[in-house]
Amino acid sequence: MAVAAGPSFWLGNETLKVPLALFALNRQRLCERLRASPAVQARSVVLLQGGEETQRYCTDTGVLFRQESFFHWAFGVTEPNCYGAIDVDTGKSILFVPRLPASHATWMGKIHSKEHFKEKYAVDDVQYTDEIASVLTSQSPSVLLTLRGVNTDSGSICREASFEGISKFNVNNTILHPEIVECLFDMGGEYYCFSSDITCSFPANGKFTADQKAIYEAVLRSCRAVMSAMKPGVWWPDMHRLADRIHLEELVRIGVLSGSIDTMLQAHLGAVFMPHGLGHFLGIDVHDVGGYPEGVERIDEPGLRSLRTARRLEPGMVLTVEPGIYFIDHLLDEALADPARACFFNRDVLQRFRGFGGVRIEEDVVVTNSGMELLTCVPRTVEEIEACMAGRDKAFTPFSGPQ
């Protein structure tokens, strides 16, 4: 979408300007989809509730506010305690903002007019939240369309979603004074409620051991193979299977496994080392919606059942690609107790990796008309990471697949 003239969200300096026309386009797309549905009556009105400002437990300390994701998608409003209505037939939008008491100006600053919010968010009309009933009654809608549904991954009902960085340290307890031997950071910045999700794995001392390098480069190979294979029409479960195949090939090369790769895949051995799905949609939520729309079924197989989508790729989709190889005692013990899988393990070599933890590499990509575009810009090869951590050469070349 080209940057349109008109209001935009901007934090200044070198940050991105996000035109408010983006949200008008989202509302238009929503209305078009609803009008095309035989289940939606004429004169229907969508009513969305924004996030509420809350305090920490019983105190008067405010909790950092983050807008409710669906409301943000439709209106782009940053203030709390708002509502929004959209006339499905006409596309007309109404933003409802709180009517603030005069004391607000004393403690919190200027009280803005309704016209201010109308101009700021490029909506058709602005009213106060205490007028919702009367305003909607005057429109005589046949039905109010509100959010209802269950998140298929969490089981929560339309719950606000948030994301915090996860830092995991693997500790070597075999010496008197434990030292951190490997770091895995799963993190993501957020801008105007739009998320990122990036994982970097690296040795804490700046130098890969031979085993660390072998596992890291195995995961890097699978990550880049998946990105090279991505294009419109590709089925996402096939990308997960591709990552599994490469992981197993590399584990055979390293000596942890031996035997036929195809037979290992039939035994779902890949899920022992990568129990999670390959990646997920990325947007206003870190694990964004749309993974399993009507007609798309979850595959009930080890590893694949953890995929957050089983759709075919389409241009414009933004996803993470996050393969990993982990040595999880619980899963390894289960596999070793199963004759169908235990036969592939070289136990002496496996023992060397017990307590290793794991490696994950997570990239953010957008599907293009003929391939994908990489959005992540961090050092990825062993050489780049070691140079960066040594303070030598901060330059690196991001991976470029077919675009």
Image: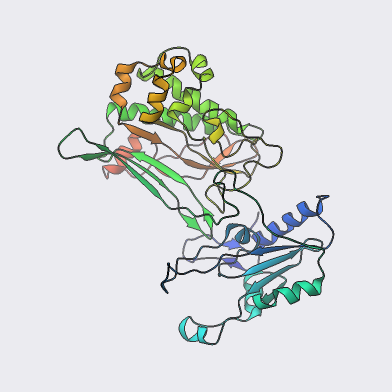
Q: Is residue 169 left or right of residue 159?
A: left
Position of 130 relative to 333 (above/below)? below
Image quadrant in which you'd find residue 327: top left
Position of 137 relative to 297 (above/below)? below
Q: Say which of 266 and 224 sits in front.
A: 266
Q: Which color scheme does this rendered protein use?
A: rainbow
Can residue 327 be seen here? The reply is no
- In the rendered image, which quarter contains the C terminus? top right
Can residue 70 be seen here? The reply is yes
- In the rendered image, which quarter contains the N terminus? bottom right
Q: Position of residue 105 (x, y in %)?
A: 51, 85
Tally of numbered discs: 0
Residue at the farthest left position:
176
Q: Say which of 50 and 250 sits in front.
A: 50
Name the residue rendered at 71%, 41% in the picture: 294
Position of 253 relative to 212 (above/below)? above
Q: Position of residue 367 (x, y in %)?
A: 60, 40
Image quadrant in which you'd find residue 86: bottom right
Name the residue rendered at 52%, 15% in the picture: 262
Q: Is residue 74 left or right of residue 14?
A: right
Q: Position of residue 24 (x, y in %)?
A: 69, 62
Name the residue rendered at 45%, 50% in the picture: 188
Q: Say which of 313 and 70 sits in front.
A: 70
Q: Is residue 177 left or right of residue 389?
A: left
Q: Position of residue 205 (x, y in %)?
A: 24, 40
Q: Say which of 253 and 45 sits in front.
A: 45
